[in-house]
Image (spheres, rainbow, N blue to C red):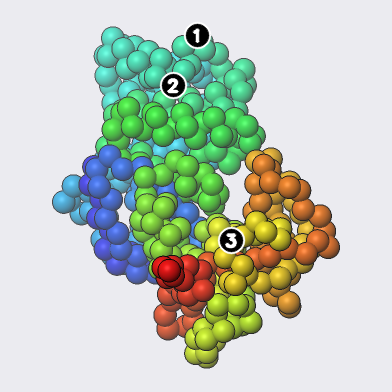
Amino acid sequence: MHIEVRGLNKSFGDFHAVKDVSFDIEKGKLIGLLGPSGGGKTSILRMLAGLETPSSGDIVFHGKRVNDLPPQERGIGFVFQNYALFKHMTVYDNVAFGLKVKKQSKEQIRERVMYLVELTGLKGFEHRYPHQLSGGQRQRVAFARALAPEPQLLLLDEPFAAIDAKIRSELRTWLKDLIESVGITSIFVTHDQEEAIEVADEIMIISKGRLEQKGSPWDIYKEPATPFVASFIGESTIVEDLSELKGFEHASSESGTKALIRPEYIELGKPGEIKLVSATMPAVVKHLHFRGSEWMVELEVGSTKLITYRSLEKDVLHPGEQVNVLLHRAYLFNDSRSWILENPLKVDPMPMFI
């Protein structure tokens, strides 16, 4: 299903939850609605589902305006955060529920249910009740039930929030493979960056009711469109005065300009580890945090605090140790614009031939 949303607004009394949101979603895409809690993500999802009525704007499915269509006529499947399974029904009957409502034959129902039970890895659990299943298994039942009526659009509201971390990680990969195998347009709400980046084909970042940016995870990380996106995606440090750092002495002095520096913008080394010595700055290691595959290092360069990473393959650093730092680039922003500034000192000088 191809989706178009134009000028979507939603107010609850005096609270403007969704503000003039517009976007297109191509058929078969898996989209992550990402943003902080209370930003308007679930309100957008519920309006697409027909569970909320827009205050203004248009929702178009395959060229047809659906604002006035009830949920059951929109061709959607909905997976809720708390599963919303029928406790008194078996796995089989939960999955079959929507098909029975559509008054399909017993043979059609059995064929569809058994196909989905196999697809979702629930074979052998058909006669169990929800209380006899793990959280991950219950969520799989919820997915199977939503897919049973063959919807054109699948909507998922924080689908992994009620599941423990290990199972949640496994289900992410499973969900992405499942969506690709059935080829259904899907939108899921999450406030978990890692989840959105790992699962989604494209991300829509929502904040304070507005769509800040839409694009692939890599494009959004590489080229954030707004200061909010730059600070929300990935780990970073905000620097009030970039001109204090070597190579950026002539950085913009426009009023209110700040710099955002990500860990990968920083090259860190003990004496002799960084080749371009002329571009480095002295720094002091303040704290170290073991991250399993690497160290996260908190540094001080003069009065400026920075965060970067260090490989486990390199010599271990210690708090208070003197190191060298090379800042490759910074993301600058103010109220009117944003831009990337490269460090001119990091370019090797032209070789001299004798």
Residue at coordinates 51% horizontally, 31% vertically from top-left? 171
Provide the residue designation for mark 2.
120
Residue at coordinates 73% horizontally, 77% vertically from top-left? 302
Res 220 seen here = yes
Which image quarter holds the C terminus? bottom left
Residue 49 image point, x, y percent: 36, 47
SS of the residue at dot 2? loop
Q: Earlier in the sequence, mark 2 or mark 3?
A: 2
Provide the residue designation for mark 1.
124
Please name the amino acid that badge 2 sits on. Answer: Thr
Provide the residue designation for mark 3.
275
Please name the amino acid that badge 1 sits on. Answer: Gly
Which image quarter holds the N terminus? top left
Q: Comparing marks 2 and 3, which lies closer to the viewer?
A: 3
Quadrant in the picture for residue 116: top left
> In the displayed structure, does residue 345 sit left or right of residue 324?
left
Counting other residues with Cα less than 10 Å from the Cα at mark 2, is it few (<14), some (14-19), or many (20 or more)?
some
Counting other residues with Cα less than 10 Å from the Cα at mark 3, is it few (<14), some (14-19), or many (20 or more)?
few
Residue 336 image point, x, y percent: 42, 83
Residue 263 image point, x, y percent: 59, 59
**Relative to 215, does residue 162 appear above or below in the rendering?**
above
Q: Earlier in the sequence, mark 1 or mark 3?
A: 1
Residue 296 image point, x, y percent: 69, 53
Residue at coordinates 41% horizontally, 63% vertically from top-left? 223
CA gap, disc 2 to disc 1? Answer: 11 Å
Residues under numbered marks 2 and 3 in contact, where contact means CB atoms less than 8 Å apart: no
Which of 136 and 54 lies nearest the eye of the viewer? 136
Res 157 seen here = no
Counting other residues with Cα less than 10 Å from the Cα at mark 1, is it few (<14), some (14-19), or many (20 or more)?
few
Which of 202 and 99 lies nearest the eye of the viewer? 202
CA gap, disc 2 to disc 3? Answer: 52 Å
